Image: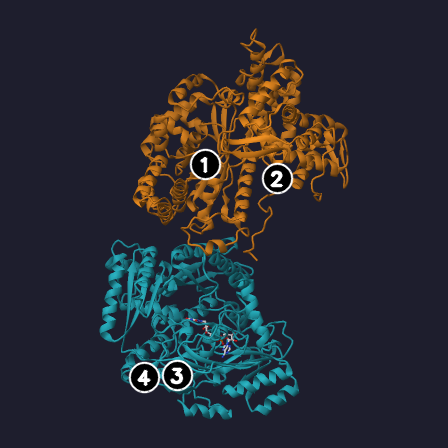
Chain colours: A orange, B cyan
Amino acid sequence: MAAAPQRGSPLYAQKEFTSKKRDDFEDILEERRQSSDLRYAMKCFNPVVYKGLSPCKPSAIKTTVLQSDQVQYVIRQLSKEMGESPDIIQEEATEILDEMGHNIQTRTIRFFALTLSKVFKTLFRKICVNGEGIQKLQQAIQEHPVVLLPSHRSYMDFLMLSYLLYTYDLALPVIAAGIDFLGMRLVGELLRKSGAFFMRRTFGGDKLYWAVFAEYVKTMIRSGYAPMEFFLEGTRSRTGKTLTPKLGLLSIVMEPFFKREVFDTYLVPISISYDRILEESLYARELLGVPKPKESTSGLLKARKILSDDFGSVHIYIGQPLSLRALASGRIDRRPYNLIPRYLPQRPSEDIQDFVNDVAYKIELLQIENMVLSPWVLIATILLQNLPAIDFDLLVEKMLWLKGLTQTFGGFLEWPDHLCANKAVTSCLALHSNIFILVNGHVVLNDKGSEGGAMEELVFKQALAILMCGSYRNQLLNLFVRPALVSVALQMTQSFRKEEVYSCFSFLRDLFSDEFIFFPGIAVKDFEEGCFLLTKCDIIQVTAQEILVAEKGSAAVSFLSAMLRPFMESYQIICRYLSKEAKEAFTEKQMISGIRNFAFPLLETGSSQCYEVLSSDVQKNALSAFVRLHVVDKMKTTNGVTYAVKKDALNKTADMLDSRIPVIKPATARL
Amino acid sequence: MAAAEEAGGAPGSASSAQRRLRVLSGHLRGSREAPALLSASPCGAQGAAGLPGPATIPKRRQELLKWNGWGYNDSKFIFNKKGQVEFTGKRYRLGGTVLPILKEWMEKTFGASLEHKTLPRATLNVNDVPPSFANEEFLQDLRATKISYSQDPEDRVFRAHGHCLHEILVLREGMFKRIPDIVVWPGCHEDVVKIVEVACKHNLCIIPFGGGTSVSSALECPEEEKRTIISLDTSQMNHILWIDERNLTARVEAGIVGQDLERQLAERGYCTGHEPDSMEFSSLGGWVATRASGMKKNIYGNIEDLVVHLKMVTPRGVIEKSCEGPRMSTGPDVHHFIMGSEGIFGVVTEVTVKIRPVPEYQKYGSVVFPNFERGVACLREVAKQRCAPASIRLMDNEQFQFGHALKPQVASIFTSFLDGLKKFYITKFKGFDPNVLCVATLLFEGDRERVLQHEKQVYDIAAKFGGLAAGEDNGQRGYMLTFVIAYLRDLGLDYYIIGESFETSVPWDRVLDLCRNVKERIVRECKEKGVQFAPLSTCRVTQTYDAGACVYFYFAFNYRGIGEPLHVYEQVETAAREEILANGGSLSHHHGVGKLRKQWMKETISDVGLGMLRSVKEYVDPNNIFGNRNLL
Ligand SMILES: Cc1cc2nc3c(=O)[nH]c(=O)nc-3n(C[C@H](O)[C@H](O)[C@H](O)COP(=O)(O)OP(=O)(O)OC[C@H]3O[C@@H](n4cnc5c(N)ncnc54)[C@H](O)[C@@H]3O)c2cc1C
């Protein structure tokens, strides 16, 4: 019964927890440092393209979109609804397309090739890419339409990818970008000419916009016009944690396959990691509520002073292209697609929505798995547990221990064979001296410039450094979250009984499902994976009924749960705030400033060390978790969304978080 | 060319219709050579009341037809002493012709080689044949009916299969696990009634057998069937009972095969115009039972359009309508329970079909398009304007090359397959890529003036889609391909090449996507399954309708180096069908479901739909006497 869609998770493949070999990384800057950038920019560019491609101009795509049955249908529909002439609506559609459409030009690409060569060489030591990934991508591009799905940590991401594809003579991607870029006129147009197309952030209600946008994307997929690139995370992650996926664009690019307008579509997970993220301090400020500078050309120019700084290396890991056809096999009921003309807009069935969601999570998990981690990520994790200072040698020792753990957990560490640990730490500290410095054999928080400031400023400065540092620790946490959650659960329950530990695990997993990436619906598997990894490192022993912490394992359990402590504590503080101070009905904005005012004194007096509670990211995630757990009600009113606390439920959750009461068993899952 | 010359001798008005018959089916001197067996049954006399017509196919089919391959014993492709392909026998126009470039095409397409040969065993080993189980009481009752029957192993094996690839392979290299225990030859409707009665009385299983051309495993005996299996061979019910010229209908016994029906009608100046590619051997009853489709359906309609009345014997009794009104509003049309019933409800014994005067003039034609997309767009337009000729088919590039490979001996011995292709396009079709272009073949029919007018209309439309006329010859060869393909398969089998065809129907807007995806799926599946040489994966649009088209696929590959070729083949075929369904194609346009495609029936007609059919079966045949287990 191949047609019967199966709910379930064949999509969730058991991972292999082995470190990947990294010997096949190639540094694309190496050649740039040796030969002429100009010649490189002017090189003969005959990229590898899709085999079924009939080349066309960007303007031809727009024409096709406008004339498509899909768009024409919506135009007619709207014209009837609004009593407007179709011509006027068509006009509108043309304008939308003009605002949206890319206008990719080789000239501009060459301009970018030249300037980016210069810029990258000053900013970065190396830009490394896995050669095998390039080869597979090259194949994939020829075979089927390709969708590139990179992680998003920096504005550099898409420049980096286009630059990479140009270097390897691969078809240049068209990139879905936020419309805010168009605010910067010069940059916006430049990006447009280098293949960016622009989507409005919200267009839920606008049928015409939706139709035009979807058709624009699908037209390019169908014809294999160019690799399509967008960010599943929707925006740059300011925290180093992978953001939960946005599904809209993903379901659009899948539709041509669902309707069999293409034989297959490749989805390519790509992980881009930076030793040091360009926007690190901007992000931290933003999270702390310092207003984000509007995207503006002048703002970008100010960033020029960044150019004198050192940002280490960049690693791009191009994952194995995933065949959508293979992913969908057995999961899609074909009847709905067979019974309606293909031009009619069709709401995806629940099965399809689930499928899209599963794929999105799968890809993000692959991004995490393939993300290259620098030693600094380990150091940051250790430092955050040893504030304000730690002995250098101790740091090195701990780091070596964490390195081993990371590798056993399948982490992808960038660690050259010959590199000695001392050197690694020193060089990381040099790169991140804005956060930590070495003083008299001790590594301490760099609080330069905060002496003598007001208390409030001091807290702010501390928070800034800690959030920056946290964004690196979070890279590790992405990967460690399952064993770390098991560790927390072990500590919270103070029990050996597997069932109880699982209950607690599953409660926390649910609570934190906006913070971290969990494949939908497989709490048991996640638990087993966490236990498996801990067992593998001799931290725990698992029997049929019990989980025992090994003698030598308790330090590791403490360490792992300490990685999550900032989240645990933040949620506890937010609970306290909500139960004490929240008004009848409040907005998100009110809550955010409320929490800040509530937490500042705690930090000033030192009664809490949890600086991360000041991060708007944690605050927002906590709010949505509480809504999901029915601890807070969400109400839509004419003036927007407001929230109200359900006291009883909140207190209960707070009690569970504080381990005052045991976690209530979720619907019994079989272990 | 021998047959074509003889055409001159054919009687006046019938000549053009017969020309087509000769081209496709060969003019059958065979009918004179093979003495017609007069039915032994007393009702055989009924035939005399209508038109006496010696049947082409004898009761002992093996005397005329291959026992382990397609068609006549004397007609086959061989490699002659010079290593060139030649077609033997004198039945077909192709007979005696050398096809010098076919070998090269085979080598190029399949990586096949003359050195690697795998021959089937020469004769049936009677000892391998499962024994016949039939109890004496039943045989006594059967004898009492005076209906001819046989328990001879050869007779039984011959009726144990159709012409699916796996069935032919079994014949060549193995043996069926279950075959009919006995073959009976009713001579008329009443005989069938008697046989069904006897079978019901003894609770036996009947499988109706028409021409044995099934390509859906419909004739295969269910292995688990424990009861005696009776193959009810309708071939002796082969008479035209009457012709009604006022209403242009004819009453015909269901066992008549296509070529006999058309030949005999032609003698009176008529035809049914129903010409499935298997028409030499397939029977009227088989067409009804499978909802067959003929290549000239644009003029004459498919079988459901041709049937005016029919009679079927079921365990519950005989079903027939009370009159022959041309259309009725009397609830759901019960004919539609019968058409397509694939032998699970009963035996169709007599059919009243529409007939038409034999057309005065026939003309082939062809159009070359720069690519398949333009070709499909053209066919769509032709369908939209409802001006499709008797037949219009669009072959993709691979099939065009295939057709090209069937060109007979040409002047220069240096001409190779590729040279020929190049010449073909350089001389006539500048700017067309010989590896991309595709060809539509056309057949026009009617009175001369109209045909010429019609021809112009179609060529004008084609021109709008970049189509250029490419001559009658290419058209005719295109049609030849469809009937020699079955013979060619036997040749391929000798050289490690296995192949099959399958078909579907699909809405117009999905035709292109379906063709591309299904072909690609086949190629990929073969690769995944370890097939060393890329398979032949080709299609043509064979019929056009207002709302869609029928698409026909050929798929063949060289299986050297593969452990279980048949298994691989079956997996690929299943995958291809999955692909068709996922692309909005139907489970079948005309081959039927049989047992081969049963697994998709529920999905195809829904639970309730299947339940409806089941309840009819339950009512008509509660003891599953017609137990071939097709469809449900
Ligand atoms: C080379 C080739 C070309 C073909 N081309 C076409 C084509 O162009 N168009 C097309 O439609 N098909 C085509 N077919 C398929 C096949 O010829 C048809 O399905 C045909 O209708 C079968 O007729 P038959 O007399 O050979 O039936 P059989 O193969 O003997 O039987 C087919 C099924 O019908 C049942 N049956 C037969 N006679 C009766 C009866 N009198 N009463 C009740 N049930 C009966 C049988 O039990 C069986 O289930 C082709 C097949 C081949 C091998």
* Nearer to the camera, A284 or B280: A284
Q: Amino acid at mark 1?
A: Phe
Q: From the image, state whether disc 1 or disc 2 is nearer to you.
A: 1
Please give the residue where the numbered disc 3 appears in the rendered image: B250
The image quarter containing residue A666 is top right
Please give the residue where the numbered disc 4 appears in the rendered image: B269
The image quarter containing residue A187 is top left
Please give the residue where the numbered disc 1 appears in the rendered image: A230
Q: Amino acid at mark 4?
A: Gly
Residue B293 drawn above or below residue B47? above
* Nearer to the camera, A189 or B126: A189
Please give the residue where the numbered disc 2 appears in the rendered image: A16
Residue B99 drawn above or below residue A84? below
* Nearer to the camera, B232 or A284: A284
Give me the chain letter of mark 1: A
Q: Amino acid at mark 2?
A: Glu
* Quadrant for the N terminus of chain A in the image: bottom right
- Distance, label 4 to label 2, CA atoms, is 77 Å
- Residue A590: percent from the left, percent from the top? 55, 24
Residue A210 shown left or right of residue B167 in the figure: left
Q: Amino acid at mark 3?
A: Ala
